Amino acid sequence: MSLLEINHIKKSFDGVEVLKDISLKVNEGEVLAIIGPSGSGKSTLLRCATDLEIPDGGEIHYKGRFGLVFQNFNLFPHFSVMKNITDAPLKVQKRGKEEVLKEARALLKKMGLEDKENAYPYQLSGGQQQRVSIARALAMNPQILFFDEPTSALDPELTGEILKVIKDLASENMTMVIVTHEMNFAKHVADHIIFMDKGVIAEQGTPEEVFSSDNTRMKEFLGKLSKEQ
Amino acid sequence: MKISIMAMISQLSGGMIGTIGIFFATLLFSLPLGLLVAFGRMSKIKIIQWIAKVYISIMRGTPLMLQLMVVYFGPYYIFKIQISASYRLGAVLIAFAINYAAYFAEIYRGGIESMPVGQYEAAGLLGYSKGQTFFRIIFPQVIKRILPSVTNEVITLVKDTSLAFAIAYAEMFTTAKQIASAQTSIIPLMAAGIFYYIFNLVVAVVMESLEKKLNYYK
């Protein structure tokens, strides 16, 4: 069953076409990684998929709720860790306090942050903040979780802890769409990879298919990356 | 007739109450009104935006003393409505509230516009309504950001209350000046000065403790 279906969406900013006729499908339990060079439109695609941008054309169909983990966390600085996680379930979903608190504590434990529930975001490292923001998104019980370059704002030594959390979620069959620059991670966690370039899907398939593709732009992109590393 | 210092102080204390009354009533009305004007100023509807802009421009561009006189004498000069002495306080409060609302509106606007868009996006994705987003997420953070500018404005307000002198409302300064000329003495004016100074010391201490209270997050 597909939880997300995007059909022929287009998006331009000031006359520059950033997305040209993109279609994709995400099935339940699937992890989709979107890779590609900067300016390829992958973030815009994610922002359209999460309603942060309105596409100029095309259709987006969801089944169920979705959550988004931002590159720069966007935690609420005036709320404690606990309140960041519980406020929306309590005030938006109007669920019972006991149930929400119990679930939040379980999420914090899963994120390895059980001792941080009364801390404020500024007291946490970037990696811890990102884990709180993942817990905040999960507390809404989304059917799909989107990640917008979840490790790009983190120091390299903190990337691993976030990637591990996402890996764990994947092993629990969480449906996820992840825009990422971490090629190794995409290779190992994703079921399906989309390579975007200049506003189109230039290549897609299983990790094996995409990483061994003959597509010149894909090869160029991977070549550049390996030179950097 | 010369009167004792004690008698002066008891007369001045009447003015003191007048000043404190103007001060609190002005804050009570102008702080919420200012937020409303700020919303108008940031409205997507051009005409509302324009009205708020003109309003702020006039309130900030003309002397408060003149605004006081217009509010107080306007009803008579324009509509020939007989004004009673009891309208004095009303006129003072109206003039101060609408004047200070304009300044507060711009402070609110600066604070609201300084909020990162990510806070709105995160709130929107979590399903908060527009009202919830503003009052639960945005506004509490705005208060922290604008508190230093608000303190400035509040300290100015303490001193500005003396402008009610222009329509002979019996606040501290009006009373002090009356006693000073009647007694040919500088003491009432000195006493008034000390009063304003201490009032502002208290304001500064209160605002500082408020800022400290909001320092629980960054």
Image: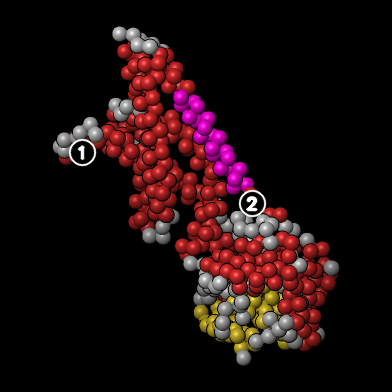
The image quadrant of residue A120 is: bottom right
In this picture, which residue range is highlighted in magenta? Answer: B195-215
Disc on res. B217: 2
The kind of secondary structure element at disc 1 is: helix
Amino acid found under the numbered disc labelled 2: Tyr
The kind of secondary structure element at disc 2 is: loop
Packing grade of label 1 (10 A; few <14, some 14-19, many >=20) is few
**Separation of residues labelled 1 and 2 (CA atoms):** 49 Å
Same-subunit check for callouts 1 and 2: yes
B17, B105: nearer the viewer:
B17
Packing grade of label 2 (10 A; few <14, some 14-19, many >=20) is some
Q: Disc 1 vs disc 2: which is toward the camera? A: 2
Q: Is residue B146 left or right of residue A222?
A: left
In the rendered view, tell whether residue A131 sits above or below residue B208: below
Q: Position of residue B185 (x, y in %)?
A: 38, 11
Q: Where does label 1 land, which residue?
A: B75
A34, A132: nearer the viewer:
A132
Q: Chain of mark 2?
A: B
The image quadrant of residue A76 is: bottom right
B218, B170: nearer the viewer:
B170
Residue at 40% x, 13% y: name it: B5
Q: Is residue A24 magenta?
A: no
Residue at 57% x, 65% y: name it: A87
Badge 1 or badge 2: first in the primary sequence? 1
Q: Chain of mark 1?
A: B
Q: Position of residue B29 (x, y in %)?
A: 38, 45
